[in-house]
Image: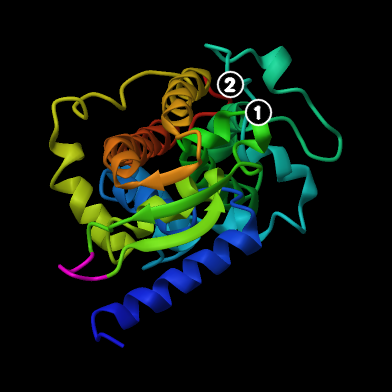
Amino acid sequence: MDRHFAPRARALILVIGLCAWSQAWSWGPEGHSIVAEIAQRRLSAPAAAMVEQLLGRGHSLASEASWADDIRDARPETYKWHFVNIPLEATRYDPRRDCRYDAQGGDCVVAEIERLRSALRCAPTMALKREALRFAVHFVGDIHQPLHTVLDERGGNDIRVVVRIDELKCTPGCRTTRFRTNFHALWDQTLIAATTWSWGAYVRRLENGWLKSPEAQGAADGGSPAQWATQTHAVARTMWRMLAADRVVDDAYYARALPALDRQLGLAGIRLARFLNDAYASAACPLK
C-alpha cells in the first residue's frame, strides 16, 4: 500500500465506523474540539480564571467538549438538548412548534442554552457550575451544526449518501474517497475529516482564514440562541437543497459546502467565547 495512502485509509475506516455507530448525534469530537479551542483563545481574564477553577489547571475546553455526548445515555433527559426540530421549509424558529418539552427527552438546544446563561454563574454548587460549563461548550457547538436545526428525515440521518470526494489533505495522485454514510454524519464528521489531518490543523486553518475575514469581525456581538438557530437553519436549507437527486456528494458539493462549514465552526467558537465571557464578567446573582 502507498505510504501516503495507508494512514489516510486507517483514518477513513475510523470515520466510517464512528458515523455508523453514533448515528451522528452532534459534531464529531473533532468539530467540538475545534469550536472549544477557538473559544479558549478568546476568553477574557475572568472567564479563563473561572474555567481553570472549574476544570483544573491545564485542562482545556477542548478536553471537555464531547462530555455531553459521553453522558447522554446515562442522562436521557438531556437527549433533546442537542438539537432543535425546525421544519425544513420554515424560515424561523418557533418555540411552541420546535422546542416542545418531553418528560423523557427534555426540550431543545435553544432553551437549554438560555438556561445555561444563569447556571454558568449562579448554579448553587461548584459541581453544577462545572456541569453547566461542559454543557455550554458542547451545545453552543451543536446549535451551529446545520442539520441539528432540521426536523425532516431526523435531521438528515435517514438520507443515505454516497461520498466521492478528493480531500484537501490528499497528496497528488492519491485515491478519491468513496463510501456510504448519511447526510447528517456527512456534516458531523466527514467534511471535517476531508479537510485537514487533525482538529488542531483545522483550528489553524480557521485562524488564518475565516476568523481573519471582515465577516468574522464583530460576528459574536449580540444575537440570542433563537437567532443562532434561525441563522443556522438557513444554512441547512441551502446545504440540503444543494444535495443532488442521486445523493452523491462529490467535489462540487464539497467545494460549495466548505465555506459554510468554515463559517459555522468559526462562528460557534467566537460566540462560545462571548457567551462565557459574558457569563463570567460578574459574580452577581441572579442575572440582571
Whether residue 151 is visible here, answered yes or no, is: yes
- Residue at 33% over, 80% down: 7
Q: Looking at the picture, does residue 233 appear above or below residue 276?
A: above
Name the chief secondary structure element in magenta. loop
Rendered image: mark on residue 151: 1
Type of residue at label 2?
A: Leu
SS class, disc 1 = loop
Q: Residues within 10 Å of mark 2 (few under 14, many from 20)?
A: some
Residue 225 is situated, as x and y percent measured from the top left of the image, at 50, 24
- Residue at 18% over, 70% down: 173
Residue 62 is situated, as x and y percent measured from the top left of the image, at 41, 58
Residue 40 is situated, as x and y percent measured from the top left of the image, at 32, 50
Q: Nearer the viewer, residue 8 or 134?
A: 8
Relative to residue 276, is residue 134 drawn left or right?
A: right
Relative to residue 228, is residue 170 drawn left or right?
A: left
Q: Residues within 10 Å of mark 1 (few under 14, many from 20)?
A: some
Queried whether the magenta region covers residue 171, the answer comes back as yes
Residue interval drawn in magenta: 170-174
Residue under label 2: 88
Q: Nearer the viewer, residue 246 or 238?
A: 246
Type of residue at label 1?
A: Leu
Q: Looking at the picture, does residue 54 appear above or below residue 14?
A: above
